Image: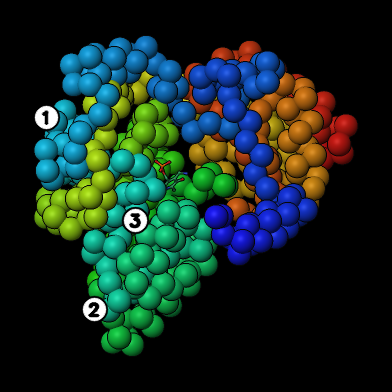
């Protein structure tokens, strides 16, 4: 018989979430996640995907995935350390290292998984982690799993980081201290101050860990935030996902050979969860080949990002601190933000509302993610909708 205590718990909490407007409603797509999407028969301009370079629907990646699937089947059949490592997994890791300008790389089944794997493989209860307060949920969970002492510093506040680093070091309590930051913060599109972080790390002998899920393919001519600042030799862990700019699925760590060797023997998802499917691996390899051979998609992404950003700013939207194509329109009030996003939807633009607890209270926003695959006409159409809906709802 089903548990009574469980159903009481679920009923109480689900009702509470629904009453507070915090219950996620999922709109299944009836199309690919390209620049235009279809939901419930309605065609919409898509400004909510992480498919930054448009590679998720690129015919070259699809062909690579189909060929590999025909050759190797749909599944890897085992974890990497038993016999789930195909030679294409190794090729992918070599490509990632080439792309990231590091000695080596290791691939995981997702970016989320990667943070759970890597942090807990090197940090433990005798250690401390300095973590930016805006870091992604997977970093937070990875830190918790490690059992290290978690010390949050104020978002991108280098004075606070330095103070906390000094305190942690001077206390003598910790064996190792790590500093972790997103490379690009996904809710505001701002870039971590990596040169200052690297300097503080050197001063206090901190291990450096950058999750560049939103910077890879976007900054540093595509190679990411670490390359953008010329710090490829200074950051110990460069994390990335294969699901955003790369367009497929999976995650990785790039770094020195000894770091990667350690992860191969100690990180639990590598040891105990089945390897990435061959079709996905081949599609990722193709994506890296495309990005290494040309910056065309990267350049188009930036042209589109700059165009949309200027258009929204000229209309009078508050686009916050964005330094990348990710462009929020900060509305403030949660209910008004939800209303505004619904209005955009009715007018043919899909730009999801992001509200507390994902962002601080009173900073509700509609977040725009233009991609290389959007045409100028799509962006103009979206801006016309932003103008109409914004005036009607008095948000501009
Ligand atoms: N890190 C960051 C900073 C992210 O934004 C995300 C995805 N939202 C992840 C990790 C997780 O990546 P994936 O979707 O590949 O699991």
141 up-or-down from 175: above or below: above
Residue designated by label 3: 116
Q: Nearer the viewer, residue 276 or 82?
A: 82
In the image, residue 41 lies at what x, y percent? 68, 16
**Mark 3 CB within 8 Å of ligand 1:** no
Q: Quadrant of residue 162?
A: bottom left
Quick check: which quadrant has ligand 1? top left
In the image, residue 115 lies at what x, y percent? 34, 53
Circle 1 Cα neighbour tier, 10 Å, few/some/many (<14 / 14–19 / ≥20): few
Circle 2 Cα neighbour tier, 10 Å, few/some/many (<14 / 14–19 / ≥20): few
Please give left or right for residue 36 compared with residue 235 in the image: right
**Residue 214 numbered tag:** none
Please give left or right for residue 31 compared with residue 15 in the image: left
In the image, residue 303 lies at what x, y percent? 51, 24
Residue designated by label 2: 175
Q: Is residue 364 visible?
A: yes
Mark with earlier residue (2, 3): 3
């Amino acid at each position: 018989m089903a548990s009574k205590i469980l159903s009481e718990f679920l009923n109480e909490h689900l009702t509470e979430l629904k009453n507070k407007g915090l219950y996620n409603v999922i709109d299944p797509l009836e199309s690919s996640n390209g620049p235009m999407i279809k939901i419930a028969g309605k065609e919409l301009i898509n400004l909510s995907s992480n498919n930054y370079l448009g590679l998720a629907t690129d015919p070259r990646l699809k062909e690579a995935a189909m060929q590999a699937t025909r050759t190797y089947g749909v599944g890897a059949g085992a974890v990497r350390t038993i016999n789930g490592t195909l030679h294409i997994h190794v090729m992918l890791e070599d490509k990632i290292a080439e792309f990231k300008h590091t000695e080596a790389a290791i691939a995981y089944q997702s970016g989320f998984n990667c943070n759970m794997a890597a942090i807990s493989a090197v940090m433990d209860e005798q250690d401390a982690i300095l973590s930016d307060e805006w870091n992604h949920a997977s970093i937070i969970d990875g830190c918790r799993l490690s059992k290290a002492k978690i010390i949050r510093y104020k978002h991108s506040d280098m004075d606070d980081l330095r103070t906390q680093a000094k305190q942690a070091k001077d206390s003598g309590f910790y064996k190792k201290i790590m500093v972790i930051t997103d490379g690009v913060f996904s809710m505001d599109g701002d870039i971590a101050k990596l040169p200052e972080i690297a300097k503080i790390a050197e001063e206090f002998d901190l291990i450096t860990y950058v999750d560049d899920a939103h910077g890879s393919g976007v900054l540093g001519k595509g190679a990411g935030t670490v390359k953008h600042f010329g710090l490829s030799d200074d950051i110990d862990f460069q994390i990335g996902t294969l699901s955003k700019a790369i367009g497929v699925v999976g995650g990785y760590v790039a770094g020195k050979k000894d770091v990667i060797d350690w992860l191969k023997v100690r990180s639990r998802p590598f040891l105990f969860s089945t390897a990435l499917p061959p079709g996905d691996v081949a599609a990722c390899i193709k994506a890296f080949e495309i990005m290494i051979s040309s910056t065309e998609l990267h350049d188009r992404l930036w042209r589109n990002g700059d165009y949309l950003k200027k258009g929204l700013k000229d209309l009078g939207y508050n686009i916050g601190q964005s330094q990348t194509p990710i462009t929020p329109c900060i509305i403030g009030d949660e209910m008004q933000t939800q209303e505004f996003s619904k209005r955009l939807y009715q007018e043919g633009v899909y730009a999801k509302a992001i509200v507390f607890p994902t962002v601080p209270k009173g900073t509700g926003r509609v977040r725009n993610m233009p991609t290389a695959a959007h045409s100028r006409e799509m962006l103009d159409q979206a801006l016309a909708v932003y103008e109409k809906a914004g005036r009607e709802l008095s948000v501009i």
